[in-house]
Image (spheres, rainbow, N blue to C red):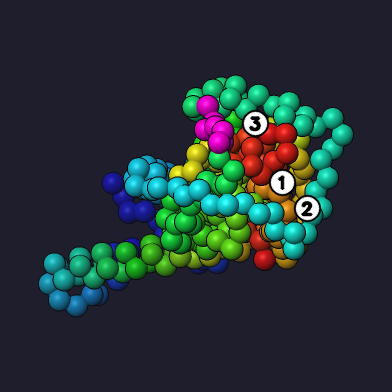
C-alpha cells in the first residue's frame, strides 16, 4: 500500500468546488427525500392517532336535535351547478355509501330539526373524509394551522361543520405530508364526497372546481344551503394558487331538512 | 477528516458526547430549514388567506 498521492496544487480550487457541489447535492437530495417521504411518515403516524381519537369522540358524543331556521341574511352561493348535474333526489345515496363500505344514511323521519354537534377543540379529530373517485380516506383535524395540516386535512374553524347549514371548508396538502389532496384536480361535477362526523355520514356532490389566488377568501364565505369546499395548493409543488372544489349536500342525516328534494 | 475531533477538549467520552450533541443540533436545524422551505415554496397546506 503506497501513499495516496497529494492532489497537485493547481487542482485545489477544483477539489473544493467538487466538495461544495457534493455537499449541495446531498443537502438538496435530503430536502427532496424529506418532503416526499419524511413528511408522509409523520402524517401517517398522526393519522393513526387521530383515527383512534375520532372513534373515542364518536363513542362519547351525544348529538342534539336543534330547530332549523334558514338564515336569510346569508348570501346565495355564486357556484352554479352545471347543466346535466343530477338533482339530489336522483342520487342513490345509500348505494354510494354501501359502495364505500358505509352503512345507510340515518333517516330524518319524524325529525324537523337538525342533528348538531359542538365543534371539537383545535388540533383534535373532527371527522373522516372519503372521496372514492380519487381514493381519499383521511381523518380531518380541527384547524388549518401549519401544525394541524401536518397531521392531515384540516377544517377551517370559523366555517360550518360538515352536514350543517353554511359552507364547511377543509384544506389539505397537495404534495407533502401524505398529500391528501394530490388528485383533487381529477374530481368532476357529480363525484361524491363523504364526511363522517359524530352526527353521521354527510354526502356531498361535486358542483365545480376552480383555481383562485390564496387571498380570494370568498370561497370560505357562509352561503345559504349546505356546502363543502375543499382547498389545496396549485399547481403541484407550488403554493402560488389554490385549487378549490365546491360540493353541495345531497345526503345524510340532515339532508332531508336542509336540501329540497334530498332523501 | 478526523482532525477536528482530536482537537476537542477532554476525554474520549466527552468528545463523543459533544459530537452527538452537535450532530443532533445540526439535524434539527436542517429539518427546520427543510420544513420552512417546503412550506414557503412547495406546499403551504392549501388554506385560504
Give the letter of the chain under mark 1.
Answer: A
Pick whichever of labels 1 and 2 is earlier in the sequence. 2
Q: In what quadrant of the picture does the C terminus of chain A appear?
A: top right
For this orientation, the residue located farthest to the front is: A110
For this orientation, the residue located farthest to the right is: A83
Secondary structure mostly taken by the magenta-highlighted segment of the chain:
loop
Residue A263 got which mark?
3
Residue, x 59% and y 30% (percent of image)? A132
Residue A223: % across, % down: 72, 56
Eye-nearest disc, 1 or 3: 3
Eye-nearest disc, 1 or 2: 2
Instruction: Using the rendered image of the protein, determine whether residue A136 is visible from the camera's viewpoint.
Output: no
Residue A77 got which mark?
2
Residue hosting label 1: A246
Query: Which region shows up in magenta?
Result: A104-110
Whether A218 is among the magenta residues is: no
Depth check: give the residue in front, B11 or A112.
A112
Residue, x 13% and y 67% (percent of image)? B13
SS type, badge 2: loop
Residue A120: % across, % down: 44, 57
Side of A160 relative to A85 (left or right):
left
Depth check: give the residue in front, A83 or B9.
A83
Residue A200: % across, % down: 50, 39
Pick whichever of labels 1 and 3 is earlier in the sequence. 1
Q: Is A73 located above or below residue A249 in the figure?
A: below
Tag 1 and tag 2, C-beta contact below 8 Å: yes
SS type, badge 1: strand
Give the letter of the chain under mark 2.
Answer: A
Residue A55 got which mark?
none
Amino acid at each position: 500500500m503506497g501513499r495516496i498521492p497529494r492532489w497537485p496544487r493547481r487542482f485545489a480550487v477544483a477539489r473544493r468546488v467538487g466538495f461544495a457541489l457534493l455537499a449541495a447535492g446531498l443537502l438538496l437530495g435530503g430536502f427532496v427525500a424529506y418532503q416526499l417521504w419524511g413528511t408522509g411518515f409523520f402524517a401517517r403516524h398522526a393519522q393513526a392517532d387521530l383515527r383512534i381519537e375520532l372513534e373515542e369522540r364518536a363513542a362519547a358524543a351525544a348529538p342534539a336535535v336543534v330547530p332549523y331556521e334558514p338564515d336569510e341574511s346569508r348570501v346565495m352561493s355564486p357556484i352554479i351547478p352545471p347543466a346535466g348535474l343530477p338533482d339530489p333526489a336522483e342520487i342513490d345515496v345509500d348505494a354510494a355509501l354501501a359502495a364505500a363500505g358505509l352503512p345507510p344514511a340515518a333517516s330524518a323521519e319524524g325529525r324537523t330539526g337538525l342533528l348538531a354537534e359542538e365543534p371539537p377543540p383545535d388540533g383534535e379529530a373532527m371527522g373522516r373524509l372519503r372521496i372514492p373517485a380519487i381514493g381519499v380516506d383521511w381523518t380531518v383535524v380541527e384547524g388549518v394551522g401549519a401544525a394541524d395540516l401536518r397531521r392531515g386535512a384540516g377544517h377551517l374553524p370559523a366555517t360550518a361543520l360538515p352536514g350543517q347549514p353554511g359552507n364547511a371548508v377543509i384544506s389539505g396538502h397537495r404534495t407533502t405530508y401524505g398529500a391528501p389532496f394530490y388528485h383533487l384536480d381529477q374530481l368532476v361535477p357529480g363525484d361524491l364526497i363523504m364526511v363522517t362526523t359524530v352526527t353521521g355520514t354527510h354526502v356531498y356532490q361535486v358542483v365545480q372546481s376552480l383555481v383562485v389566488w390564496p387571498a380570494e377568501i370568498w370561497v370560505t364565505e357562509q352561503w345559504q344551503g349546505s356546502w363543502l369546499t375543499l382547498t389545496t395548493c396549485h399547481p403541484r409543488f407550488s403554493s402560488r394558487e389554490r385549487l378549490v372544489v365546491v360540493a353541495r349536500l345531497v345526503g345524510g342525516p340532515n339532508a332531508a331538512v336542509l336540501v329540497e328534494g334530498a332523501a | 477528516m478526523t482532525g477536528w475531533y482530536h482537537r476537542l477538549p477532554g476525554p474520549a467520552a466527552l468528545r463523543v458526547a459533544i459530537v452527538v450533541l452537535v450532530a443532533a443540533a445540526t439535524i434539527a436545524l436542517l429539518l427546520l430549514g427543510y420544513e420552512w422551505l417546503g412550506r414557503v415554496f412547495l406546499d403551504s397546506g392549501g388554506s385560504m388567506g
